[in-house]
Amino acid sequence: MSYYIEPAPIKDKENPFESMMFRFDEAARIIGLDDEVYNVLKSPARQVIVSLPVTMDNGKIEVFTGYRVVHSTVLGPSKGGIRYDMDVTLDEVKALAAWMTWKCAVVDIPYGGAKGGIICNPRKMSAGELERLTRAYTSALVDVFGPDRDIPAPDMGTGPREMAWIMDEFSKAQGKTVNAVITGKPLVLGGSLGRTEATGRGVMISAMSAMSKMNMNPIKSTCAIQGFGNVGSHAAILLASRGLKVCGISDHTGAFWNDNGIDVEAAVQYRLENNGLLEGFTGAERISNDELLEAKVDILVPAAIEDVITKNNAHRIKAKLIVEGANGPTGAKADKILYDNEITVVPDILANAGGVTVSYFEWIQNRLGYKWTAERVNRRSDRIMKSAFEKVHQTAVKYDISYRLAAYVIAIQKVADTYRYRGGY
Ligand code: GLU
């Protein structure tokens, strides 16, 4: 089996860690960050690699590789999801961990950043295999995780089911129930109302905020959404509910287009009944993934994976506004092309921060032993998203820079200031 082998880098793809560092360097220059603090903030605090032997259903033992990178704990316990995917690499997890630090700082929640990943193909594994793998990973990282240390959450390939296993395995090791060790749990285990929709909802709030700055009328605007998982599907429903016409959607099985607007609820329902896949959906015509990204729409929401907008296709993007539901969907080399073409980009570390914001609310509720209503969760997360957007907008105007750089400027400034107060050795 090839579970041990790291996938070869795809040609022309940017290394996500280098993409992150490129923006970090630019923002550090703008705020005049001194070399000492620069060196502290660029280095992940902790990188753990674990080998996870798991008995597969056929009785054979497979060894999986898992990672947990804690980028920073300057602002508080580190926070970030766990990804199950064959393309997971240490560099990817390092970039994603740093993005979590900047994301939490942009929305002003008291967390540092971390990320985890396991090289595996969850679509090809049984529930039993996934449970054993998840428990093995938790057990290997029991000294890293903790409600005041490092708090994981879902990411690509994981969801409430995996979070429940992690909570249970961690709790067993502590000899007591510790539900605040992880967020994105099922509701009955202390999950928060609104957490499932939270990232998509934040994408919608970010899109609405940007449209208002750009004098775009939602009722007259069209959009295409790449990725129809938890983020993309909820963003599609919520954008459609605000009057936008969702003309294009896609998942890894293909892309779909309808000039008159796709019935998003029907697509969600279809996917539910079709093993989580859009393949075979008849409410739209088939187009290629490139056609979807380059379609003539007002708004493009990349909500799948990293590095889909690159130096090779950025000049063909026709949307006026890009709202990044995924982490790192735009490579650093594409930033300048989009900026020169006057395409506004609401960057990942702002646009998809609704998820970690409601994770923060889940953690608060667990610690209080109290449940908030969905109305309270949504009202508070909308307020956080809107005020973070406004701050990014004002910083972009002040320095005459893109929203992306402005978000990095705010985040790095905040973490650097906090670090100076806390001090080192
Ligand atoms: N994986 C999500 C993200 O990238 C959520 C992280 C969290 O809730 O801690 O933002």
Image (tube, rainbow, N blue to C red):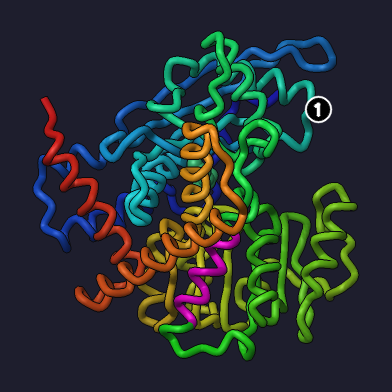
Amino acid bearing label 1:
Ser
Q: Is residue 5 above or below residue 143?
A: below
Quarter of the image for residue 74 reads top left
Image position, residue 215 (x, y; %): 46, 90
Image position, residue 45 (x, y; %): 30, 30
According to the picture, the residue beneath numbered tag 1 turns out to be 126
**Dot 1: element:** loop
At 66% from the left and 39% from the top, the residue drawn is 159
Residue 275 relative to residue 90: left or right? right
At 49% from the left and 45% from the top, the residue drawn is 361
- Give the magenta part as a residue range: 200-211
Q: Is residue 56 magenta?
A: no
Q: In this view, does 5 lie above or below 239?
A: above
| Visible residue check, residue 97 | yes
Image position, residue 226 (x, y; %): 65, 64
Question: 288 or 59: nearer the eye?
Answer: 59
Image position, residue 232 (x, y; %): 65, 60
Q: Is the magenta stretch mostly helix, strand or loop?
A: helix
